[in-house]
Amino acid sequence: MILTSVLQAMGLFAATNIDDIIVLSLFCARGAGQRGTTARILAGQYLGFAGILGAAVLVTIGAGAFLPSAAIPYFGLIPLGLGLWAAWQAWRGDDDDDDDEAKVAGKKVGVWTVAGVTLANGGDNIGVYTPVFLSVEPLAVVAYCIVFLALVAVLVALAKFVATRPPIAEVLERWEHILFPIVLIGLGIVILVSGGAFGL
């Protein structure tokens, strides 16, 4: 049970944070040669991601307390909708909100700057994590959160690696637009079907 949750958490984290690797690598490149850059980026990413997780957990607690259990599976419509929208944008080629260079343009590499960009970039994450948290046991939610927080450090390390290898960043950016919608659509369908929404 816990092992399954850990593996699912790793997959979910990877799918929802590919774009963060690009943004963080741009911060790493901007702060190259400055002392303490990696530490500031790591602290900022942890602060921002803790905010995302905190929001997702609070929404989960609120929904679990005030909504009937029969309504919970319909939260699968959120990742499904986000995935379809992301697929539509990728197909049309107008995913302007994913202009990663614009997200860090003119910004200094400070803890609060990185945290702010992470939070601003994480709205989709809250929409995805909440239905998942609602569909699993509280112990699994704890496992998800621990895995996510552990992987934040891995994410920053990968971003630092990517910052010195632009061809890798190009590959990640190219596949992000395909992987992200597929994972979200699949996740939404699984939550709807496993919860018995629409009599499925």
Image (spheres, rainbow, N blue to C red):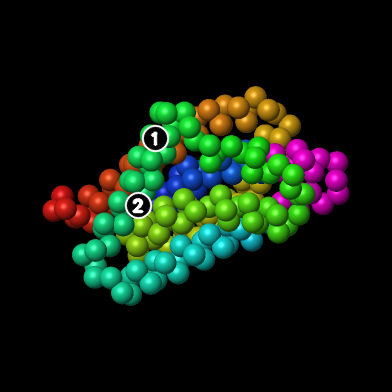
Q: Residue at x 44, y 31 (%)?
A: 90
Query: Counting other residues with Cα less than 10 Å from the Cα at mark 1, is it few (<14), some (14-19), or many (20 or more)?
Result: many
Q: Residue at x 23, y 56 (%)?
A: 195
Classify 171 as above or below 9: above
> Rounded to the nearest whole Å, what is the CA distance between mark 2 and mark 1?
14 Å
Report whether 121 appears left or right of 86. Answer: right
Label located before the other in sequence (2 or 1): 2
Question: 98 or 133: which is nearer to us?
Answer: 98
- The label shown at residue 87 is 1
Quadrant of the snapshot with the N terminus: bottom left
From this viewpoint, which residue is outermost toward the top? 167
The amino acid at mark 2 is: Ile
Q: Residue at x 53, y 41 (%)?
A: 97
Task: State the extent of the magenta-drawn residues as a range.
Answer: 25-42
- The label shown at residue 78 is 2
Can see residue 158? no
Mostly what secondary structure, the magenta segment? helix
Q: Secondary structure at mark 2?
A: helix
**Image quarter for residue 179?**
top left
